[in-house]
């Protein structure tokens, strides 16, 4: 992909060099920075996520849209902009072209980040928790575009399952329908974002990054155009208390309904409600899990870079 100054897609030189030489690269999303975490922790966490990727020998490529151009890999000044600018909108795939054409700025969701990473040739992507089927979906039809996009984009996503604010069982069923592969990292249970166990079992588990790389190679051989989810649970010491979680969630869902929160505002609203009403406990858990996922993604990207493509 060209990186000339007039291009609509700007690849950071560190990222393009790593890609050209076959070195490991990890894509990172930006919605978690702009809409998932409060200021000023968001910037600190964004930097920590990049740092752990680097410390495990991979190049971090945080993806965002700034002033009409898609950036694959941000400078520190650009990371500060994503964290602090008030005009950053949350962009899924369908929003990207509109934002770009208007010279706007946006943070990218899992769906948008996956599409851009795939376009740039980045195979591994780390985030906190995926979007999925919302609990009121029978009435609202609210299902994240993360799902359909991951059904048609070949990327390996390291995450702590899907956000626990969702209907996890329904989301797992949709993943099956959409041919999204799901493996538990050293667990037989599907993780529950803030909680290590969502209460749902998994068919497959892997025990090291090399095993994930082997699955990626097999997927490439089949030319599968869907995602592989590596579900990495938060550690037992860092997970949120289950009762606190359940009480906070039912409060949050009630509040969201009474205030008429809908569409793409639902997820940021509920995450913010968690961060406020747990007095930072959910923030600590969210930070811990996303950093752990970025570190594991770097190890997977490294294992993959050694294997035949
Ligand atoms: N993971 C986190 N925090 C977040 C998100 C993921 O730890 O804020 C974001 C991702 O960008 C994901 C989005 O794509 O939430 C889902 O939003 P929605 O449910 O509106 O599709
Ligand atoms: Mn939605």
Image (cartoon, rainbow, N blue to C red):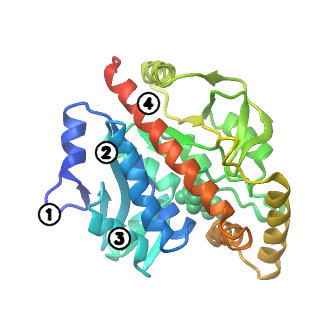
Q: How many marks?
A: 4
Q: Nearer the viewer, residue 150 or 213?
A: 213
Q: Can you tell which mark lies on residue 274?
A: none
Which of the two labelled residues, at mark 2 and mark 4, occupies the earlier sequence position?
2
The residue mark sitting in front, 2 or 3, is 3
Residue at which label 3 appears:
80
Cβ atoms at labels 2 and 3 below 8 Å apart: no
Mark 4: secondary structure: helix
Label 1 neighbour load within 10 Å: few <14, some 14-19, many 20+: few
Residue at which label 1 appears:
5
Label 2 neighbour load within 10 Å: few <14, some 14-19, many 20+: some
Mark 1: secondary structure: loop
Label 3 neighbour load within 10 Å: few <14, some 14-19, many 20+: some
Residue 142 seen in the figure: yes
Q: Is residue 304 left or right of residue 260?
A: left
Query: Which x, y percent locates residue 185?
Result: 60, 30
């Amino acid at each position: 992909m060209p990186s000339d100054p007039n291009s609509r897609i700007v690849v950071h030189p560190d990222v393009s060099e790593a890609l050209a030489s076959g070195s490991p690269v990890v894509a990172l999303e930006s919605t978690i920075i702009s809409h998932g975490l409060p200021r000023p922790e968001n910037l600190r966490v964004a930097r920590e996520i990049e740092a752990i990727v680097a410390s495990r020998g991979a190049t971090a490529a945080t993806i965002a849209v700034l002033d009409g151009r898609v950036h694959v890999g941000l400078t520190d000044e650009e990371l500060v902009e994503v964290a602090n600018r008030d005009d950053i909108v949350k962009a899924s795939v369908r929003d990207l072209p509109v934002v770009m054409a208007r010279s706007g700025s946006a943070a990218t969701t899992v769906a948008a980040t996956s599409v851009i990473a795939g376009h740039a040739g980045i195979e591994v992507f780390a985030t906190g928790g995926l979007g999925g089927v919302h609990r009121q979906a029978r009435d609202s039809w609210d299902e994240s575009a993360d799902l359909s996009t991951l059904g048609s984009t070949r990327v390996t996503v390291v995450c702590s399952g899907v956000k626990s604010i969702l209907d996890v069982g329904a989301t797992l069923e949709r993943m099956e329908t959409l041919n999204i592969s799901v493996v538990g990292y050293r667990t037989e249970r599907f993780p529950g974002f803030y909680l290590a166990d969502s209460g749902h079992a998994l068919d497959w588990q892997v025990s090291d990054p090399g095993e994930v790389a082997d699955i990626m190679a097999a997927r490439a051989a089949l030319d599968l155009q869907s995602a592989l989810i590596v579900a990495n649970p938060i550690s037992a010491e860092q997970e949120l208390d289950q009762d606190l979680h359940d009480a906070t969630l039912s409060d949050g869902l009630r509040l969201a309904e009474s205030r008429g929160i809908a569409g793409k505002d639902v997820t940021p609203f509920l995450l913010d409600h968690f961060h406020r009403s747990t007095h930072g406990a959910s923030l600590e858990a969210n930070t811990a899990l996303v950093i752990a996922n970025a570190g594991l993604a770097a190890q997977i990207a490294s294992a993959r870079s050694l294997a035949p493509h």
